Amino acid sequence: MSAPPARLVAALIALTALPARAGLPRPDERPSPNRRTPVVAAVEKVRGAVVNVSAEELVRIRVPSRADSMTDLLFGEFFERPRFRRGYQVTSLGSGVIVSPDGYVLTNAHVVERGARFRVGLLDGRELLAKVVGTDPSSDLAVLRLDSKERLPYATLGRSEGLLPGETVIAIGNPFGLSHTVTTGVVSAVHRNFRAGDRTLFDFVQTDASINPGNSGGALLDLEGRLVGVNTAILGDRNAGIGFAIPIDRARRIADDLIAHGEVREGYLGISVDDLPPRDGAAEGTSGGVRVIAVEPGSPAERAGVRRGDVVVSVDGFEPASAEEFRFRARDLAIGGEARLELLRGGARLAVTPKAVELSGDRVMELVARRTGLALGEERAQGRTFVVVRKVTRGSEAAQIGLQAGDLVREVNSSEVSTLAELRQAAARARRSGRLVLLVQRGYAAERIAFDFD
């Protein structure tokens, strides 16, 4: 075999002498003009306003005994009464969003329904104490106030009216404790009603932006970074692409009342309605609506010309599919706001605009008496005050149930009452659920009794 030519040998030596190239080629470090999308810009604008809400729940903590011997260590608990001390257990509950520079936070009522003290975690790592300004369980909204003298980052409120199915939205929250998680999706539907257990929930924004446990109370944003909803629920046990947010238009009205009054002041029209059977609707020329079964004397509805027997076809442009939905939309009116009602009467369509008024304490007691048949008063015994049944109207629902004068009313919708003033407040809150549930005591026996209350 002949030797390789000298020129080839020199070339091979030169190649092997070159330094080996390490790793991959250098990246292209030029800034991408397309990276800062509208989604990125919206998140950068609002992310700092989304917070984690944790509860400090007051619990009993067992104090371990001091064992001096193995016998004490093994058997001491059988011979020694265990000792406890009070302490706080911290639980991460959900999300919230700061909506003003002075520290008001919107979140869900179910996020703060338990717990003695609350802490809020910010994006920059700070933790601030928060107090509950007010809650409205029927709408699942709550307002917190942060303990801070500094100007805080906050989300600008947008409008939920006008949201379009297919419009891109962004959810920010703390699912499974993963702080400030961002997901995107679209508005799947607006003004959505859905069933949750034995209740129907009305008028939500439905989205397929991923919402999971811990997202409750977090922000739903449009592409301008404006708050358009408060994330509150998912359908079923897992996120199947179906989540729900409270529209910000409704959340704003409720939050304003909670901040100003500590509770939601409900609009009162003075109309009682019942479901319209399908055959009656067809005869009236409508596929939906509810029938007026009573108009309270002197009420806004009576002054506007609403009559018993009218069919309410729409409320502010929405067709109520049931009496329950009508009650929801009527109670959701702001004090002084006008309700645009479209009525059917004898084949003719009428439009009326009763103005919602605040339900006074006296009017609440009148409604309680009219719906239940109970006349209530106060009595003092053994240094305590009780709400007592004075009289039961013959033929009323209470009389049919068997209630009697002398029975005690101990709770209204699970709120303890011992005075008529407390009962009035609890009954006014009960109107948002449409049910008045009284815990009535006779002797040593007590029973909860529910009445329709709209």
Image (cartoon, rainbow, N blue to C red):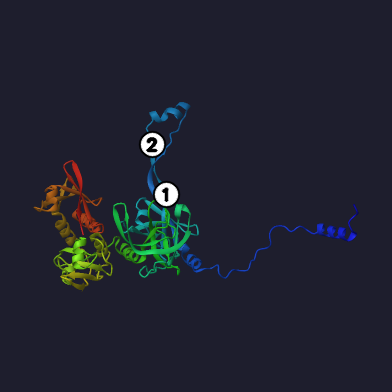
Report the residue marked by disc 2: 83
The disc placed on residue 141 is: none
Q: Nearer the viewer, mark 1 or mark 2?
A: 1
Report the residue marked by disc 1: 91
Left or right, 138 with reference to 344: right
Left or right, 396 with reference to 201: left
The secondary element bearing badge 2 is classed as strand
Q: Amino acid at mark 2?
A: Arg
Q: Amino acid at mark 1?
A: Thr
Rendering quarter of residue 262 = bottom left
The secondary element bearing badge 1 is classed as strand
Any part of residue 105 in sight = no
Residue closer to the observer: 68 or 342: 342
Left or right, 387 with reference to 36: left
Q: Are marks 1 and 2 in contact (CB under 8 Å)?
A: no
Residue closer to the observer: 233 or 77: 233
Q: Position of residue 111 (x, y in %)?
A: 37, 54
Residue placed furthest toward the left: 394
Q: Residues within 10 Å of mark 1 (few under 14, many from 20)?
A: some
**Quarter in which the C terminus is drawn:** bottom left
Any part of residue 250 in sight = yes
Residue at 15 percent across and 50 percent down: it is 388
Q: Position of residue 395 (x, y in %)?
A: 9, 53
Q: CA distance from mark 1 to mark 2?
A: 24 Å
Q: Earlier in the sequence, mark 1 or mark 2?
A: 2
Q: Position of residue 130 (x, y in %)?
A: 40, 57
